[in-house]
Amino acid sequence: MLGRIFKAYDIRGTYPDLLNDQMAWQIGYGCSKFLLADAASAGETTPMMKNVVVGRDMRTSSPTLSKQVVQGIADHGGNVIDIGLVDTPMVYFAINHLDCAGGVMVTASHNPPQYNGFKVSKRRAKPVGEATGLADVRKFAAMVDKATLVPASGRSETRDLWAAYTRHVRHFLTLKRPVKVVIDASNGMAGTMVPRVFGPIGTRGASGVPGLTIVPLNFDNTKGTFVHEPNPLVAANLRQLQAAVVAEGADLGICFDGDADRCVVVDEKGHVVGCDHLTALLAKSFLGPSPGSAVVYDLRSTKAVPEEVTKAGGRPVRGRVGHVFMKALMAEHGAVFGGELSGHFYFRDNYNADSGAIAMATVLTLLSSTARTLGELIRPLARYAQSGEINFQIEDKDAALNELRGMFPAGPQRQVDDLDGLTIDGFGREGWWFNVRKSNTEPLLRLNAEARDRKTLDRLLEKIKPKMGKQVDH
């Protein structure tokens, strides 16, 4: 049963059929055994290295699952610092702020309300995925028998870290002119985080930050249900926000996912800002005080990202999709900033971790430093035609990739690489590039393509699509 809920990057399943309380206790035990051993193997022997941070989201099953995880950690011998109802990036902050062995966040992120799960991080909030420890957690969890175990005497305490977390996030926020923002919390943890970090929202949207006006949407997270799916990458989930921005005459809108580690921005006219375009825009502001630094971006991003980073005097670093790979590249290259098409944004001064709250603070800071609108700032960056991610259902994924490779062979001005799926880049001469990646869990291929103009993109897609199976909405 445990094997069905362990994924490539986290643990997730429906509650209580696939994921139940007994499993949560086992997972807590397994996490403690892995995290404490990992810290010890790195020579981390301070008293804090027996401490594991635990946080949880607003789902109705989260309090029970959190309690079981805490007990499992303590029964192994780990000491728990329970920080309560928080956004996922606050767990990353707590691990570093308190110098702990790692942490566990009880959340199912953007999944429907019947789901729950766990995101595990080790020391310095480095992500724990299948290849970096999750397989060990699964093994330790499967092997422990609660009925015969003699529990160890790990301690558990609760701490309120909101004041320290607020100071940390506010470090990224400086408003030079008033800004009005509509925030859609998606009935998720942004409904708790935004009032705590940016101040209580009073009449007429006044916030705890001078000059910042916040119009709240879907902040109520007490019921564990969602007005719309808490996934800001789905266009339908942004419609309420887009309408509100226009109706309120706001400068921008921000939609968070369920655990508030991802966000998507819309401009003053309600137009969705591509996360890669936002990466290009923010990169310039981070490179100003850190000239020559690296900026990490995922390989699905527009060519405008490396172009703008280079133009601003930075070093563009192209990486695989996923926070495990992005955070590793951030550390390896000493990058000042990173952005992913999925709405994750990474910051050197946030322990190389992603944060929806800090992404919000940096966008507000940038916008307040200019008289131009967000739409005006983004327009020159959205200079190429993009397909967006298109999904195709196909059983023999490898055969399709091989056929595409044969159709577009490498040459003097066409590069082919396998960094993450198949990328074929003829942008220099032919004016296009594309990437095709296999889904880890489904018989799907995911296509992202870009060209200098729409006509070139359409011709490219006419060649590619017939080789990729049945196009599906997913």
Image (cartoon, rainbow, N blue to C red):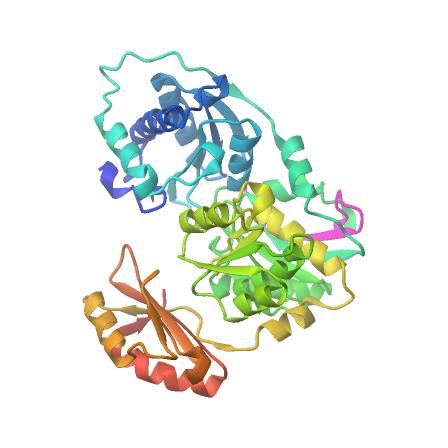
On whether residue 210 falls in the magenta region, the answer is yes
Q: Residue 381 appears in which quarter of the rendering?
A: bottom right
On whether residue 170 falls in the magenta region, the answer is no
- Name the residue located 27 percent from the left edge and 55 percent from the top edge: 441
Residue 340: horizontal and vertical position, in percent? 49, 57
Q: Is residue 144 above or below residue 175?
A: above
For the N terminus, the image quarter is: top left
Residue 219 seen anywhere in this rendered image of the structure: no
- Name the residue located 71 percent from the left edge and 63 percent from the top edge: 251
- Name the residue located 19 percent from the left edge and 70 percent from the top edge: 399
Residue range in magenta is: 205-221
Residue 210: horizontal and vertical position, in percent? 80, 47
Identify which residue, 73 or 325, lies in the foreground: 325
For the C terminus, the image quarter is: bottom left
Q: Is residue 375 above or below residue 212?
A: below
- Name the residue located 41 percent from the left edge and 47 percent from the top edge: 324
Q: Is residue 392 left or right of residue 93?
A: left
Q: Is residue 163 left or right of residue 31?
A: right
Identify which residue, 66 or 285, lies in the foreground: 285
Q: Residue 149 appears in which quarter of the rendering?
A: top left
